[in-house]
Image: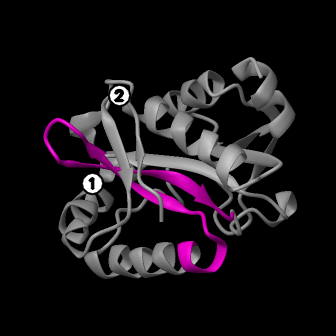
Amino acid sequence: MPELLTPRLRLRAWRDADLTPLAALDADPEVMRWIGDGQPRTTEQTAASLVNIRAGWAERGWGVFAVEVRESGELAGWTGLAIPRFLPEIMPAVEIGWRLARAHWGRGYATEAAREALRFGFEDAGLDRVVSVCHTENHASARVMAKLGMREERRTAVPATGVPVVVRAITREEYAAAAGD
């Protein structure tokens, strides 16, 4: 798994020590209100997610990065690429997502990290198209998606929960044109 650097962040492989801060992030109701059914996760659920994240990297050569603040070494959260199986109507697809602890909100970290993960997806992993899905009321994530150059593709609902979502997308060509290539 590669390590990627931005001016303020390190996107890196997951460490066993990341479970505790990640579990705290996943247990925060405010962080989780726009995720899945909006319920906080248990430490066991977070641990299972980490197992799946590591397996995804091993299987595909891309996935979800731990996001660390370079100055402090603190785990801020995650960003990266995953398969959005929760929304079958858009499959096959690769989704970019992010989740940060509240202490790291409002600093531009989500955009900074996701921009680098998107670059990795197109330039290193060779993806042709990337989507992002957010709850229709999650305006903060919608702003990040817009900053990444993603265009709205559709509005729908997640079958398992009925949660209304917006799907945004960007192709490799759109990404390259925006990057000035």
Residue occupying the point 56% across, 79% down: 58
Q: Position of residue 147 (x, y in %)?
A: 60, 22
Residue occupying the point 62% across, 39% down: 119
Q: Is 32 placed left or right of 95 in the picture?
A: left
Which mark is on residue 103? none
Q: Position of residue 118 (x, y in %)?
A: 62, 41
Asked whether the residues under the numbered discs 2 and 1 touch, taking CB atoms below 8 Å apart as contact, a structural biologist would say: no
Camera sees residue 122: yes
Which residue is at the far left? Answer: 72
Q: Dot 2, how many residues are within 10 Å of its Cα: few (below 14), some (14-19), or many (20+)?
A: few
Q: Is 87 placed left or right of 47 in the picture?
A: right
Q: Quadrant of residue 43?
A: bottom left
Task: Report, in whole angstroms, how far the alpha carbon at label 2 lies from the one at label 1.
Answer: 27 Å
Q: Position of residue 96 (x, y in %)?
A: 61, 49
Could you tell me which secondary element the residue under label 1 belongs to? loop
Amino acid at pointer 1:
Asp
Q: Quadrant of residue 123?
A: top right
Q: Position of residue 134 (x, y in %)?
A: 61, 43
Q: Which residue is mark 2?
A: 7
Task: Judge whether residue 77 is colored magenta.
Answer: yes
Which mark is on residue 28? 1
Amino acid at pointer 2:
Pro
Q: How many marks?
A: 2
Over which residues does the magenta segment extend? 57-83
Residue 63 vertical position relative to residue 105 in the rendered view, above or below? below
Q: Dot 1, how many residues are within 10 Å of its Cα: few (below 14), some (14-19), or many (20+)?
A: some
Camera sees residue 37: no
